[in-house]
Image (cartoon, helix red, strand yellow):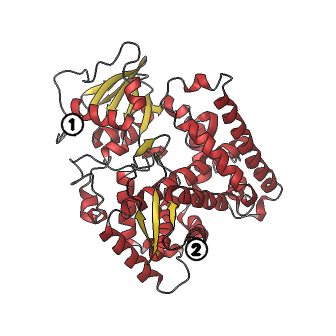
Amino acid sequence: MSTRSRPATPATLDPPGPPGLPFLGEAWRLMRDPLGFLAEVGGEYGDFVHFRVGRLDAYYLAHPDYVREVLFAQRTSFTLSPLRRKLIPVLGLGLLTSEGELHSRQRRLMQPVFRKSRIETYAACMADLSRRMHDRWQPGQEIDLSAEIMRLTIHVAAKALFSHDIEDDSDVVERNFDLLLDYFTRLMSPFLSLSLKLPLPSTARFNDALRSLDAVIYRMIENRAANPAAGDDLLSLLLRATDGETQAQMSAKQLRDELVTLLVAGYETSANVNAWTLYLIAQSPDADRRLHEEARSLLAGRPSFEAADADRLAYTRKAVSEGLRLYPPGWFIGREALADVAIGPYTVPKGGLVLMSQYVMHRDPRFYEAPGRFLPERWTPEFMDRLPRGAYFPFSGGDRHCIGEGFAWQEALLILATILERWKLELVPGQHIRPEPSVTLRPNTGIRMVVRAR
């Protein structure tokens, strides 16, 4: 990547960029290898790159100043990108896909559910389920770490969302989510929306999975609605939630959309944060040793970690920060301009698609020394003070900042500490693991590990 020190100030107001192919523009390159493509055009053309994706004008922004403009300073000039709207067939109009007043109202309704005091009530569940998972392991056993963590995080999400009611349906939820997530892997395809309208076997599987998942979700809503005061899980809290401004409550359809969105975030996103971070730790013996020592010293003979421990796991927090830097689950953000918007020396025209990539930005050598290395110790207070706002945004920013960030942090810290206090994970040699950009940044294969008792 280029070692540009600051945004370029060109003599022309036309952003540079690749010419692309007739009709397609850069659609094929973006779909085939989005991470490589964005890193390549940023390195070649600078911090503000224009290219076409079919008939759409796209603008890739690769400097923190520009990211701040879009996510904070001029956020009201942008709306969701067409790519985000492709999630609606699965997620409906939940927090991730809703816009305007609906999004504002839903965020007001859900904000109290994600207060720190509320999130802390799920700490025991997170630690207990983590311990149950690794209690099944045997010294010398080979495991698929990504599959193990996926199963763990879906159980954590189900417990937090539905308490114990979903236990009998957890296999159904997991199986159907895997089918629906296959839809997300085709998110960049310009033919995705069309394929769902054709009588294809993949379309039939998609629709069957969606109906099966909805049946579980609506049954949970119906059971809880019969006695909303009885539970203390997220569904019960959402059923009781009332908008302080309008006194409105969520409809069953809106509850369904928010619950599916939270399941995707609590299952897929959290699993990837933990799996990638453990993958990195397995390749860093010094970090592994320090994490083990911190966890063992803090646990000090207690049976499991507690909510208060999340604030004491200082080095573990640095390791998770570094995992989020190198493999952010949300690897790009897209916005559509509602009007002509001036950003730096350029103007994004109305209808223009703006793209920003956490994955590429987090590896920019202008802001991160040795950007490709896993170095948890880089996260000192001094480093964080120097880091430009907009150079690190794993949970997005502005009014669409991830509402579940606190939940994700507590879960990651407690899962990592619980595992590493007892087990050392060793990568099975010969694997070719790389990030697969879908709706989140997943490993392209399983992550095979051998577990060793400490």
Q: Position of residue 196 (x, y in %)?
A: 63, 26
Instruction: Decide: few, some or many residues near mark 2? Use Cα within 10 Å; few <14, some 14-19, many ≥20.
Output: few
Location of residue 43 (image quadrant): top left
Residue farthest toward the top in the current orientation of the protein? 22
Q: Position of residue 359 (x, y in %)?
A: 36, 45
Label 2 and label 1: CA atoms lie apart by 52 Å
At label 2, the amino acid type is: Asp
Q: Residue at x 75, y 58 (%)?
A: 168
In the picture, measured across the screen, residue 80 lies left or right of residue 391, that is: right
Q: Nearer the viewer's eye, disc 2 or disc 1?
A: 2
**Looking at the rendering, in which quadrant would you find the N terminus?**
top left
Q: Residue at x 43, y 46 (%)?
A: 396
Q: Residue at x 59, y 22 (%)?
A: 194
Disc number at residue 7? 1
Residue farthest toward the right in the current orientation of the protein? 226
Q: Which is nearer the eye, 345 or 96?
A: 96
Figure check: 249 above or below 198: below
Dot 2: what SS?
helix
Q: Position of residue 89 (x, y in %)?
A: 63, 33
Location of residue 4 (image quadrant): top left
Q: Residue at x 19, y 39 (%)?
A: 2
Figure check: 296 above or below 176: below
Label 2, on which residue?
135
Dot 1: what SS?
loop
At label 1, the amino acid type is: Pro
